Every structure is written in C-alpha cells, then in structure tokens.
Image (cartoon, helix red, strand yellow):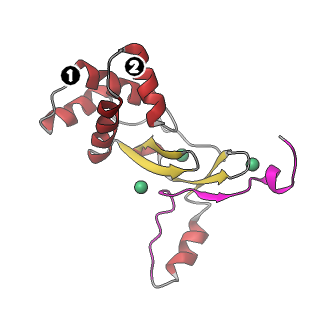
Amino acid sequence: MDHVHTIVGVANGDVMEMLRVRGLRMTPQRRAIVSEVMRTRGHISPAAIVRQVQDAMPGVNASTVYRTLSLLEQVGVLQHSHLESGAEYHRSEDAAHVHLTCSSCGSDDALSLGEAESLHALIRTHHGFEADLTHFAIGGLCGRCAKGVAR
Ligand SMILES: [Zn+2]
Ligand SMILES: [Zn+2]
Ligand SMILES: [Zn+2]
C-alpha cells in the first residue's frame, strides 16, 4: 500500500505561531523554509528542502534549514524516519506507517500500522517490548528483486 496523506493538519500560520511562541524570530528565511515544508507531501528530504529553499532564496545556509527542520520536529509538526537513503521527515499526520526499503533497487514501500499489528503484537510478547515500527525502515528485497526480475 502507498503512503496515506491526510488533508487535515496544521496550517502555515499555525506553525509560524508555534515557533514564535518559542521565542524564535520569524525571519524571511525561516518563513520560506516553513512554507516549503508545509507544501511538501509524503517524504520530506532535508537535502531537497535545502535545494528548493536555496532556489527560491539564494544565500540561505543549509544549517539554517536543518535547524528549522529540527525545531519543527520539537514542536510536533514533523517526525523523522531512517530510510535506506538516510533520515527523512514526514508531516506528523503522514508518519504512521512502516517503511520497507529494498536494498537492491532502493524502492520504498509502506505498510500500514494495521497491517503491521501482528508483528507489533509478536514483539510485545518479548518482555512487553513496545516497538515503534515507524522509526526505522525494515530492509530487505522487494518482491521483484526477490524474484530476480530486472527492473
Ligand atoms: Zn514514509
Ligand atoms: Zn531517529
Ligand atoms: Zn527491489
């Protein structure tokens, strides 16, 4: 199944307000970064945000982008996952899925938490461990690579 993207979520202005409440000055750079993040659906690659923000506003430091992404995670707007390609963010409302990444072709598939429930329950039988299956991707081979079919 593909990623499910919900329509509901926080608006741009709400996010700016959340950051302002934390005493952060909403500089034009930070506004541009927040807008770019809020426009992005599905996986939010930090490197791609840096590229897009720098296209729109030359001179923005990559470190400013990374710091802002991390702040957006602290206020609950974003959540990160570790994928084959590195850490990526999701809007929090899009984050509830388990990543299945193919180590051969690099494809990224997703399992809903409902589909993963029996795995979650199985792990819980081990000393009551509550697994967060969304945080790290499960690596392996996609169906096509496992069958040895060329792409
Ligand atoms: Zn994802
Ligand atoms: Zn992490
Ligand atoms: Zn594959």
Mark 1, ligand 2, within 8 Å: the answer is no
Q: Does the magenta stretch include residue 136?
A: yes
Q: Residue at x 19, y 25 (%)?
A: 26
Q: Which residue is drawn at 45% across and 77% down?
A: 129
Is label 1 in a helix, a strand or a loop? loop
In the rendered picture of this protein, how many numbered marks are placed on residues? 2
Q: Earlier in the sequence, mark 1 or mark 2?
A: 1
- Which dot, 1 or 2, sits closer to the camera? 2
**Occupied quadrant, residue 121:** bottom right
Q: In this view, does 76 lie to the left or right of 132?
A: left
Magenta residues (range): 128-150
**Occupied quadrant, residue 8:** top left
Estimate how packed mark 1 is, as few (under 14), some (14 to 19) or many (20 or more) residues with alpha carbons within 10 Å: few
Q: Which residue is drawn at 48% across and 38% down?
A: 6
Q: Name the residue under label 1.
A: 27
- As measured in the structure, the alpha-carbon distance from the residue carrying label 1 to the one carrying label 2 is 15 Å
Q: Residue at x 40, y 30 (%)?
A: 37
Label drawn at residue 54? 2
Q: Which amino acid does label 1 sit on?
A: Thr
Q: Which amino acid does label 2 sit on?
A: Gln
Query: What secondary structure do most residues of the magenta stretch adopt?
Result: loop
Image location (x, y in percent) of residue 27: 20, 22
Q: Is residue 23 left or right of residue 117?
A: left
Label drawn at residue 89? none
Q: Is residue 31 left or right of residue 82?
A: left
